[in-house]
Amino acid sequence: MSTTGGGSRVFRRLSGIAIRWAWEKASMIGAIGPTDAKGRAFGHIGEGSMLAFPQGAIYNERYIHIGSKTMVGPFACVTAGMAPGQEMASDPVVSIGDRCVIGRGSHIIGHWRIEIGDDIQTGPYVYITDQNHSYENVDEPIGRQWPVEAAVKIGSGSWLGANVVVLPGSVIGENVVVAAGAVVRGTFPDRCVVAGVPARVVRRWVPGKGWVSEGELRRDARG
C-alpha cells in the first residue's frame, strides 16, 4: 500500500506550521518602532507606535513624524517627496498624530504638507496625497507637466472607510465619517458624514436635533 499521499499530507502540514511560525516571527522582528535603527531615521516616532511588517515604500523618513501609540498597517506606503534623498521645502511633510490606525495597503504620499490629527482610523487601501498633475498645457502630456501641491488636513477623531481617496487641498473637520470609496476634495465641517464621488456631506450633527440628513435640512429651510 502506497504511503505517498500520507507523507505528502504530513509534509504539507509541517511545512505550513513552519512557514506560519516564520512569518509570525518576521512580522514581529520586521516591524518598525521608535527604538529600531529604521525608526530612528524618522523625524519622530512616538512611544508605542509601529509600522507593521511588511512595509510598503517608505523614504525620506526624516520628514515624516508619527505620534504615540499609532499603528501603520502592513503594505502601507508613507513617503515624502518623489524619490529617496530628496530635499523637501517643508518639515514635517507628513505628520500622523497619536493613537491612529492606518489601514493595510494605504498610501500617504506627501510633497508639501499632510497633517493627520489624533485618534484617526482608516480602512484598508486609503490614498491621501497633497500633489496632483496639472493639465494647463493641452499640447503637453499630462505626466510631463509640473505638478500642483496643496496642503491636506484631516481633523482628529475622524474615520476614513476603505478605498477613500483624499485629494490635494482637502480639509476634513474633526469627528467626520468618510464613507468607503469616497473621493474627497474641498473643505468639510466637523461632525458630518461625507460620501460619494465627488464627496459631499450627506448627514451632519445639529445641536438639539442630533444627526440630520441634508435632505431634512433642505426641507426645514424651505419651511
Image (cartoon, helix red, strand yellow):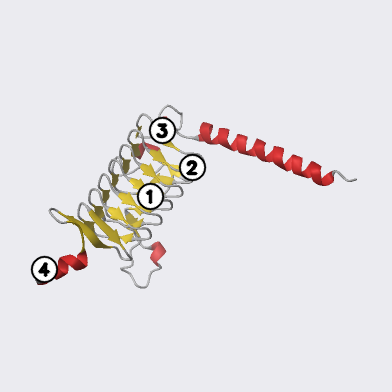
- Residue 54 drawn above or below residue 195: above
Tell me the crowding category of disc 2: few under 14, some 14 to 19, or many 20 or more residues within 10 angstroms, Cα based.
many
Mark 1 vs mark 2: give the one in front: 2
Q: What amino acid type is highlighted by mark number 2?
A: Gln
Circles 2, 3 touching at the beta carbon (< 8 Å): no
Mark earlier in primary sequence (1, 2): 2
Mark earlier in primary sequence (4, 1): 1
Q: Check disc 4 and report its element: helix, strand or loop.
A: helix
Residue indicated by mark 2: 55
Residue indicated by mark 4: 221
Residue indicated by mark 1: 109
Tell me the crowding category of disc 1: few under 14, some 14 to 19, or many 20 or more residues within 10 angstroms, Cα based.
many
Q: Check disc 1 and report its element: helix, strand or loop.
A: strand
Q: What amino acid type is highlighted by mark number 1?
A: Ile
Q: Which residue is drawn at 64% across and 38% down?
A: 19
Mark 4 vs mark 1: give the one in front: 4
Mark 4 vs mark 2: give the one in front: 4
Q: What amino acid type is highlighted by mark number 3?
A: Ala
Residue indicated by mark 3: 41
How far is disc 1 from disc 2 in space, using C-alphas? 14 Å
